[in-house]
Image: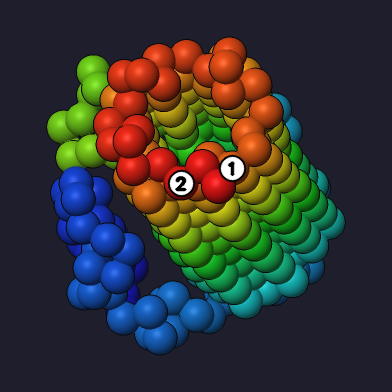
Amino acid sequence: MKAKAVLTALGVVLAAPAANAQDMMRDVDLTSPAMVSAEMSRAEVETVLTKASAAAPADFTGKRLSGLDLSGLDMSGAILRAARLNRTKLAGAHLDRAILDQAWLLEADLTGASLKGANLFAAQMARARLDGADLTGARIAADLTGASLVGASIAEAHLGADMRNQSMGLMRAVLRSANLAGLNARNADLSRVDLEFASLKGADLTGASLRSAQLGGADLSGATVIGTDFEGADLVSSKLIAPIGLDRAKNLDKARNSERVIRK
């Protein structure tokens, strides 16, 4: 698929407020060279990075970088808007303040990567691996369906929908069926986020906002919920088994389907 066709398909993704990940990408040929190949080598990427500066950051906008091993590289501040990084290895990479808006990171390996303050707006990250990654303060309106963020940090990150600007449909993080065990989500904005069937076992949700979030079938067993705001959250069939600080959670009485929560 040519770049123009990919971006056209991405426009369909942005305009679909309620479709699931498979429906949103059904018109995109994920096996095409544009989605699975690389037009640069690791050495060429490193060359671009060495020439970058704060005033002129490395720019990989729209580049095909799928399948490369970019583990450990310092790509802090790099512009990767609409870049294709499907199945790319970025383990231990530094992507602090990087711009990854509309980027494709399907099944990418970001294990232990640092993405502090990064922008991930409309990024496609289904089944990506971010175990131990640090996304503190990041803006994450990405599709992370089936992703793994075991032991990762999204502390003070913004994953919720900005209801003042939703001209392209409901843009917020989608973490359906994601593994978020041990996640640090202290003071994170998870309002209206799709967390259906996600595992939040042992997660730290202290001070986090789950206002109007979708938590159907989610597992919050052993999670810390001190100061967590549940107003409007849908808790149908969610598991709240031995949570820590439930008596100090906020607006649990204003959650939807709270009578259908599994408590033991």
Q: Residue at the spot x=16%, y=32% of the render?
A: 167
On the image, the x and y values in percent for residue 53 come to 72, 33
Looking at the image, is 11 positioned above or below residue 246?
below
In the picture, measured across the screen, residue 60 lies left or right of residue 230, that is: right
Helix or strand or loop: what does disc 2 sit on? loop
Residue hosting label 1:
241
Q: Amino acid at mark 1?
A: Ile
On the image, the x and y values in percent for residue 254 come to 31, 19
Quadrant in the picture for residue 157 = top right
Quadrant in the picture for residue 97 = top right
| Label 2 CA crowd tier, 10 Å (few <14, some 14–19, many 20+) | some
**Nearest the camera: 238 or 73?**
238
Residue 158, disc: none
On the image, the x and y values in percent for residue 25 come to 28, 68
In the picture, measured across the screen, residue 14 lies left or right of residue 85, that is: left
Looking at the image, is 227 positioned above or below residue 107?
above
**Nearest the camera: 83 or 194?**
194
On the image, the x and y values in percent for residue 38 come to 57, 76
Q: Residue at the spot x=41%, y=53% of the render?
A: 217
| Label 1 CA crowd tier, 10 Å (few <14, some 14–19, many 20+) | some
Looking at the image, is 229 positioned above or below residue 173?
above
Helix or strand or loop: what does disc 1 sit on? loop
Q: How is the image coloured?
A: rainbow
Q: Residue at the spot x=44%, y=76% of the render?
A: 35
Q: Is there a contact, CB below 8 Å, between mark 2 and mark 1?
A: yes
Quadrant in the picture for residue 197 = bottom left
Residue hosting label 2:
262
**Nearest the camera: 19 or 81?**
19
